[in-house]
Amino acid sequence: MKTTVETRSRSARRQRRPRAVLPLLSGLLLLAGCSGDSPSALNPAGTGAARINGLWWLLFWISVVVFVEVMALLAWALVFRRGAARVRHGQPLRFVTIAGAAIPFVILVAVYGVGLRDLAALGAGPGRDALTVEVTGHKWWWEVRYPDASGATANEIHIPVGERVKVRLRTADVLHSFWVPQLMPKTDLIAGETRETWLEARKAGSYRGQCAEYCGTQHAHMAFLVVAQSRAEFDAWLARLDAPARAPRTDAERRGQQAFVQGTCAACHSIRGTGAQGRVGPDLSNVGSRWSIGAGAVPNDAGHLGGWIANSQTVKPGNAMPPQPVDAARLPDLIAYLRSLE
Amino acid sequence: MTDRGGVVAAATGAEALTTELPVGRPTGWWGMVMFVATEATLFACLLGSYFYLRFQYGPQWPPPGIEDPTLLKPLVMTAILVPSSLPVMWAERGIRHGQRRRLRLGMAATLLMGTTFLLLQGTEYDEKLHMFSLTTNAYGSLFYVITGFHGLHVLVGLTMIGWLLVASLRGGSFGAHRHDRVRNVAIYWHFVDTVWVAILFTIYLSPRL
Amino acid sequence: MSTTTGTPPGVGRDDLERLTEHWEEPRSLRAWFTTVDHKKIGRRYLVTAGFFFALAGLGALTMRTQLARPEAEVLSPQEYNQLFTMHGTAMIFLFATPMLFGFGNFLVPLMIGSRDMAFPRLNAFGYWVFLFAGLFMWASLPFGAAPNNGWFAYAPLNDVRNNPGLHMDVYALGLLFLGISTTAGAINFIVTALKLRAPGMSLNRVPLFVWAIVATAFMVIFALPALNTDNALLFLDRRFGAHFFDPSHGGNVLLWQHLFWIFGHPDVYIIVMPALGIVSAVLPAFTRRGVVGYPLIVLAIVAISIISFGVWVHHMFATGLPQLSYSFFSAASTIITIPSGIQIFAWLATMLLGRLVLRAPLLFVIGFIVTFVLGGFTGAMFALTAFDQQVTDSYFVVAHFHYVLVGGAVFPILAGIYYWLPKMTGRMYHEGLARWAFWLFFTGMHVTFFPMHLYGLFGMPRRVYTYRGDLGWNGWNLVSTIGAYLLAVSLLLVLIGVVHAVRRGRPAPADPWDGDSLEWSTASPPEPYNFPVIPQVHSLHPAWDERTVESTSSGATEDRILSHGRRTLFTSELDARPERAVRMPEPTFKPLVLAGALLVFFVAMLLAWYPVAVAAVAAVAATVAAWLWPTRRPDEELGVAS
């Protein structure tokens, strides 16, 4: 499997070489496609996305060739066939049948074959004993669990690099779609059913994913991050997900924990090893280490966290968390505690 | 109404008598056939939804708590509705030969049979509602919506037939040369009957297969 | 009425006077509400659809303004979601199809040499329903209650728990209401084309535009019921507690998608097919020859309308259905591009063998070919399941369907507007203004939508009201927004061009283009009776055919003049042999009353005033009963035996 993938991407690279022919188009595609932070499908880092990338360049170049041909015919007509006299001759049915049906048929059959092969490759999931991630879509965040860990995290999926990881997809409410452009095409989350896909990152790094099926008010803010790391790092991370949350160390953190557990927070959120066991919102046991707040709405820093707690409706209007009546004096403690949870 | 004045004058001219003799299919016939085609597709979608939900649901159908539908009453209903097309055909053939009486009698007979069908359906609902309703589950929704939608069509068909009956009782409405409306209503009624057979099979027989 | 043509030879002055007496409608308010003239109704369809197009376009412009920069706050998410839903819903249902039905209404009777549609009153009824349904849907926007779930409104986000308020009730009821109009129009087109063709216009002489309209109408007949079923079930779920789409009670959310796309994919062709018909109709005049490969194009039209019913699952390639079914639907979706390829190459061949006259309509046709071909490429890409899974629901698919629909429908519609404006209004448009409009539109189209391919590939999902600034999408989004403003300016120029033509344009001759089809053989604008003499058709290009032209002048015969009474001719379905002359209905208020009663019904259902709804149903039944009530005739005329 691996070798075919490599020849495929080599051939894709070969196909990209005649870029000088059409510098404009390819330049456009390349420009932002490979720029640093873009979650571009044309900058694949996973086995699935790499296959589609190869398929794309094949389709792209076929399209370019056919388009040039059609434009040439059009230009020929425009330049050489001007006039006003009525024409009575010519029914070139053979030309229309060959150029409009026979040649496209051959191209399409070939392309269909390639596409079918890629579809089969995407369908070849990991083995039965592969690592499994349970992902549940909520309006508008992703709950992430591992069968081997008691805890849950949100909007962040850690996987070991170079391994094919099974992802089991469910939704708690409406349809969502699981999409990490650089790793794997989409799979929808269907209400009342379970779907499966897989991820395989070829190199370590963070890959942005986002809900791709319209799911209501905050569909725009339902992003997540796939963190591909070495097996050792991953194992350590998973072990922390199984253990109780980090205990508070400073007075401020202790006061923050108390405020959290005794206040309204615990009604919806849980933190492992504390009295907070709410199941409505995301588990916050490792919230301090996460890449963002509100599923990609804002960066995870003290200022944004405070703003979110006070009134998340100004940050992500329509989300399920009402403005919190937190005592202004307690807010810094709460922030300190949550930021300490790594 | 505005469109009366010229009509009688134009229609009683000698030319009208010769040119309005039926030659070829009239537009109304095609219109009704197309309308029935789109309505039939609508029923096909509903019945397709029934089978889709059934096979997505799981092995037990109807769902637990709902018994298999009993057959006696629907078969009686079938035995009333399907033959109700016969008087329509008889009436249509009659008016084609200018026999106004056959049209009146046939329409009256169909009206009676169709109404009996609806009354029986009412008692059927009365029974079933003790067991499940539209809001019980998807099965209940399918049962009432499919049979109810068909019942609505029977009602519309009966309205048309009642309308024909009233028009034919007035006199001066239909005859050997003018019976497009009779033919169109007949097409619709045959359609309503035929669809019932598909519904009988889907709702009442298929759970037993 | 215009009198640009004198008395045609072969028709007596008294014949013309009688025709005018029987067909002309007075210029009064009453006549405005009672008209059954297909030309007036067709023009109303065009103007009304144009109005809804403007509304939906302004919505798009607002959205593009919001998306010009990352994290902009021009619109709230709730507003944005209503706008993008109304944009799609209105463009598909209230603009594209009614606009093309408008062309069909105006043109089909003229192209087939008839004096009206088969059911003129049904035609008027269809227009009023379209108008009321459109207003019904748009009126929800100022109340903040517009549909907000995307134009395909997936379950379970459309249910009452996830989406309280009237939003999706407006959607379900509005589309059911509109469906009545579309179905009525479709039946009317089919029957008109079957029975009202001029004598001699056998099937192999039917203009391609009429073929396209009829094929479209057949697709409507068999596709629209799926949408109607879907929306009826949705409304029952929402309002009366049924469970069709509720998995917790045995329902299934994918049922919605199946039914929707069984309608939805044919609907793409319902939109594009008549537009392709416009292309086939416009080309002969500007290439100075008939379109190459008439039988091939007819075959392509028929093939598309059948295959389009077997490809719906390609809209569901990411829902995780079995791979085997994906392989099948992928193959069908690949194959369906071939009939379109045949048409494209037939048009190219026509241009290569013809003599081009580069006027505005031809410019728009060329713009169509360039754009539609690009949309076709991405369409073929989407047929491949694996590729589809990567780019569906991203901006790549937004780019794709705008290339197909703007390319495949709006370009031809604009070509059609310039081409037939002289026929519809009796006035010529300003060529320079039209050329400006074309170049701005062409540029705006590609500047707006081409970048969407890119940021779609770069990972931007569709239907997001905003995006973060660090993802490499900013620049291209700004480019798209600039393009959207260019598009707006170009369409404003089109509007100015039309208004200018109507107000100031020089009078148009009957046939300014030397066109090939029958509408060019009568006055601009046509008299209320369309043709003083119904032509006897002898070829596929009747207006270029001397024998056909002669049949309306020196060869005119009484059985084709039919000046006694408001009459036209029925012919046989296949060969168009004359069958009989028939009387056509007079103007009447009933279509308006019936549509009004339906409006009351749908408003009452929306607001849960059920007694009012029942009363409205009674009014509907009474109006229909009165409408069809048979005229009283003497027994000897009826042929009564007993």
Image: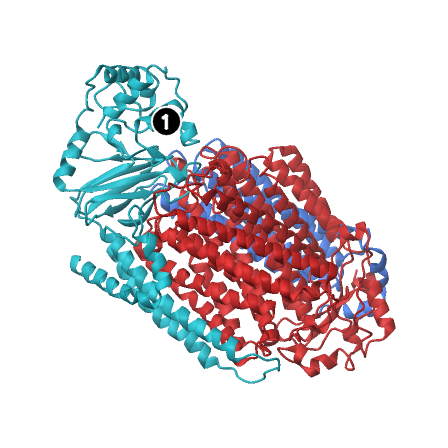
Whether residue B198 is visible here, answered yes or no, is: no
Give the colour scheme shown.
by chain
* A241 displayed left or right of C450: left
**Nearer-the-camera pick, A202 or B204:** A202
* Residue C461 sits above or below residue C343 on the image: above
Residue for badge 1:
A308
Q: Residue at x 70, y 54 (%)?
A: C124
Q: Where's residue A170, x and y in %?
A: 31, 39
* Left or right, A248 with reference to C342: left
Q: Which chain is red?
A: C
* Residue C56, horizontal then vertical, whole percent: 56, 48
Q: How many marks?
A: 1
Work out whether residue C91 can be spotted.
yes
Q: Quadrant of residue B93?
A: bottom right
Q: Is residue C497 left or right of residue C525?
A: left
Residue lying at the far bottom in this picture: please name it. Answer: A89
**Could you tell me residue B68's position as x and y percent?**
41, 40
According to the rendering, which colour does chain A have? cyan
* Quadrant where the image shows the N terminus of chain A: bottom left
Residue type indicated by callout 1: Trp
Q: Pick the residue in front: B113 or C203.
A: C203
Write down which chain is painted blue: B
Q: Could you tell me which secondary element the residue under label 1 belongs to?
A: helix
Q: Is residue B6 above or below residue C557?
A: above
Mark 1 burial class by Cα count in 10 Å: few <14, some 14-19, many 20+: many
